[in-house]
C-alpha cells in the first residue's frame, strides 16, 4: 500500500438493508483535515471502507496492493478474487479486546447498540406494564425479563430493562458473569452447572449434554418470564441453541422472545430468522440488521471506531510497522 | 490523624471535587452512598462532578447507567479522557476503580498532589490483572467500599454542619 501524505479512502456499496454509514460527516471532516481524502472507489484507492464485505464489483475497481476495511469479515465468495487481485482485507470484528484497541472496538460499540435495541423492542411489544405500580385500581408490574448471555449486548439489555423498572434475571456460562450481572442490578441465575471460560473474555461452545441440562434448568425461569432476550454468540461459530421450542411454548400468551443472535443462526428454536412472528400469542422476534434500526447512534460510534483504525494505520505506516503491528495482524484475514 | 480523618478533612476543605467511579462501584452497589456523599459536600458549598472514563465498567455506558440509577443525572457526569479534564478540580477521588487509574495503562493519570483513592483492597486487581503502583502509594483508603464510604460520610457529618 502506498499512502503518501494521507490515506486515499473510498466507501463501498452496501446491501439496501444496511442503514449505517461507515463514516459520518464529523469524522469525514476530521480525516480530511488530517490529509485523508474520500473519493469514489478507483485505482487510486488505498483503503475501501464498508460495513458488510466488499462486493466483487468494488474489488475489481481497486489496484493490487489496495486494502479493504469492513465491520464484517469477507464472505468466502470473494476470497478467490481478492487473492487474484492481491487485495488485503482487514475486519473490524477481529479487533482484539485490549486497552490499546479499545477506541477501534466496533464489535463492542455495535453490540451495545444491539442490546439496547433488543430491550426496547422487547419491552415495547409487551402487552403489560413494566415497572411496579401499586395503585388504587390495583397493582401492576413489575414485568420479569430473562436475559441469556452477559456480554456487552446482554449487559446493555439488562441495564435497559432495569432502567425501565423490570425485574431482571440473567445467565451466562462464564464464571465472571455473576458479579457483572449483579453490577447492573440484575439477578444471576445459579444453575449449578460447572462454569466455562472461553478465550479473551468470549464464551465458547458447550457439549451436548451440558447444553440440554442448561435448557432443563432454565425452563422454569423462561416459563415465568414476560420477556426473554437472548444474546449468546461464539466468535467464528454458529450461535448456540439456548431456548428450545418447548421452552418458549411454556410461556404465557402475550410474552415476547427477542433473539439477538438471529444473524448467527439464532439462540431460539422455531423462529423465522430475519423476521418477527406471533405463535399462539407469543411474539418471536428474530430480525436481522438490528444495529441498523438505530442507524444514527450506531453510525456515530462505528464511524469513530473506523476513524481510529485509519489513524492507527496511518501511524503504523509512518513508523513502518504495518506488517508487525499486533492490532492490524489480528484484523487481517 | 488517621487516614480516614485526614480524608474527611480533605473532602470538607475542597471546593471543587471530581469523583471517578470504576466497576467496583457498580459491583459493590455503593452508588447510593456516593450520591449521599455528593449531596452533603454540595450542601457545604463544594462543586461535585462525577468523572466517567469511556472504558470504565464492563460495557460502554456502564457507569453512566449506575450513576443515573441513583439520581446522578447527565448534567453531573463528565467524560474524563485527557489530563486536562482533571485540571479544574482541587480534589480527585477515585472509587472502586483500579485499571482506569493505572498510570501504566495511561487512561487516567491521577495528579500526585490532590488525589484520594478508595479501593476494596490495595491488591484487589482489576480486569487487566495488572498492579497499579498508585494504589497504596497515593493517599488510599482500603477495605470494603460500603464500610469505608459509611465511615467517611459519618466523619464528614461529625466534623460540622
Image (cartoon, rainbow, N blue to C red):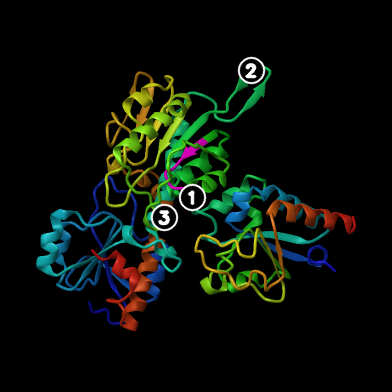
Chain assignment, label 2: A
Q: Nearer the viewer, mark 2 or mark 1?
A: 1
Q: CA distance from mark 3 to mark 2?
A: 45 Å
Is the C-beta separation of discs 2 and 1 under 8 Å?
no
Is the C-beta separation of discs 3 and 2 under 8 Å?
no
Q: CA distance from mark 1 to mark 3?
A: 9 Å
Crowdedness near tag 1: few (<14), some (14–19) or many (≥20) residues, C-alpha within 10 Å:
some
Residue A22: which quarter of the image? Answer: bottom left
The residue depicted at 33 percent of the width and 29 percent of the height is A244
Chain assignment, label 3: A
Residue A172 located within the stretch drawn in magenta? yes
Q: Position of residue B17 (x, y in %)?
A: 72, 64
Q: In this figure, which residue is indicated by the disc labeled 2?
A: A138
Crowdedness near tag 2: few (<14), some (14–19) or many (≥20) residues, C-alpha within 10 Å:
few
Q: What element does badge 3 sit on?
A: helix
Q: Position of residue A107 (x, y in %)?
A: 37, 55
The span picked out in magenta is A169-175
Which mark sits nearer the N-terminus, 2 or 1? 2
Chain assignment, label 1: A
Is residue A296 visible in the rendered image? The answer is: no
Q: In this figure, which residue is indicated by the disc labeled 3?
A: A201
Image height check: is A55 above or below A268? below
The residue depicted at 59 percent of the width and 67 percent of the height is B101
Q: Position of residue A315 (x, y in %)?
A: 36, 78
- In the image, B130 versus B59, the foreground residue is B130
Q: What element does badge 1 sit on?
A: loop
Q: CA distance from mark 2 to mark 1?
A: 40 Å
Which mark sits nearer the N-terminus, 1 or 3? 1
Q: In this figure, which residue is indicated by the disc labeled 1?
A: A176
Residue A209: which quarter of the image? Answer: top left
Apparent side of residue A161 relative to residue B136 in the rendered image (left or right): left
Amino acid at each position: 500500500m502506498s499512502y503518501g501524505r494521507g490515506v486515499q479512502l473510498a466507501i463501498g456499496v452496501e446491501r439496501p438493508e444496511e442503514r449505517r454509514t461507515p463514516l459520518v460527516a464529523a469524522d469525514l471532516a476530521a480525516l480530511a483535515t488530517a490529509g485523508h481524502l474520500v473519493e469514489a472507489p478507483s485505482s487510486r484507492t488505498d483503503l475501501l471502507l464498508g460495513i458488510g464485505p466488499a462486493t466483487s464489483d468494488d474489488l475489481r475497481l481497486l489496484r493490487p496492493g489496495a486494502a479493504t476495511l469492513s465491520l464484517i469479515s469477507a464472505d468466502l465468495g470473494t476470497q478467490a478474487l481478492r487473492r487474484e487481485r492481491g487485495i488485503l482485507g482487514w475486519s473490524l470484528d477481529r479487533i482484539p479486546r485490549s486497552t490499546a484497541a479499545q477506541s477501534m472496538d466496533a464489535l463492542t460499540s455495535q453490540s451495545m447498540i444491539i442490546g439496547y435495541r433488543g430491550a426496547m423492542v422487547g419491552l415495547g411489544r409487551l402487552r403489560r406494564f413494566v415497572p411496579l405500580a401499586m395503585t388504587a385500581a390495583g397493582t401492576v408490574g413489575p414485568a420479569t425479563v430473562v436475559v441469556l448471555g452477559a456480554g456487552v449486548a446482554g449487559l446493555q439489555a439488562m441495564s435497559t430493562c432495569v432502567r425501565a423498572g423490570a425485574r431482571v434475571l440473567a445467565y451466562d456460562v462464564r464464571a465472571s458473569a455473576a458479579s457483572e450481572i449483579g453490577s447492573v442490578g440484575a439477578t444471576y441465575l445459579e444453575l449449578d452447572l460447572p462454569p466455562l471460560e472461553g478465550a479473551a473474555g468470549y464464551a465458547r461452545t458447550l457439549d451436548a449434554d451440558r447444553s440440554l441440562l442448561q435448557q432443563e434448568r432454565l425452563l422454569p425461569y423462561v416459563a415465568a418470564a414476560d420477556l426473554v432476550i437472548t444474546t449468546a454468540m461464539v466468535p467464528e461459530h454458529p450461535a448456540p441453541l439456548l431456548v428450545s421450542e418447548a421452552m418458549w411454548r411454556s410461556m404465557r400468551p402475550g410474552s415476547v422472545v427477542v433473539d439477538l443472535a438471529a444473524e448467527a443462526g439464532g439462540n431460539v428454536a422455531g423462529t423465522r430468522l430475519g423476521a418477527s412472528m406471533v405463535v399462539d400469542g407469543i411474539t418471536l422476534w428474530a430480525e436481522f440488521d438490528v444495529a441498523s434500526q438505530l442507524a444514527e447512534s450506531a453510525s456515530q460510534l462505528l464511524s469513530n471506531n473506523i476513524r481510529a483504525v485509519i489513524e492507527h494505520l496511518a501511524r503504523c505506516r509512518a513508523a513502518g510497522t504495518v506488517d508487525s503491528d499486533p492490532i492490524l495482524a489480528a484484523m487481517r484475514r | 490523624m488517621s487516614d480516614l480523618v485526614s480524608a474527611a478533612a480533605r473532602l470538607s476543605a475542597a471546593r471543587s471535587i471530581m469523583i471517578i467511579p470504576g466497576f467496583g462501584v457498580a459491583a459493590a452497589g455503593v452508588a447510593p452512598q456516593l450520591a449521599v456523599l455528593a449531596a452533603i459536600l454540595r450542601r457545604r458549598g463544594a462543586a461535585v462532578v462525577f468523572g466517567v472514563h469511556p472504558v470504565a465498567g464492563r460495557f460502554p455506558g456502564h457507569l453512566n447507567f449506575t450513576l443515573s440509577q441513583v439520581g446522578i443525572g447527565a448534567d453531573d457526569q463528565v467524560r474524563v479522557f485527557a489530563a486536562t479534564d482533571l485540571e479544574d478540580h482541587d480534589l480527585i477521588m477515585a472509587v472502586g476503580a483500579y485499571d482506569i487509574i493505572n498510570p501504566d495503562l495511561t487512561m487516567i493519570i491521577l495528579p500526585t498532589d490532590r488525589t484520594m483513592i478508595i479501593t476494596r483492597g490495595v491488591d484487589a486487581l482489576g480486569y487487566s490483572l495488572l498492579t497499579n503502583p498508585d494504589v497504596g502509594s497515593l493517599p488510599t483508603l482500603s477495605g470494603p467500599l460500603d464500610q469505608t464510604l459509611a465511615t467517611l460520610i459519618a466523619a464528614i457529618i461529625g466534623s460540622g454542619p
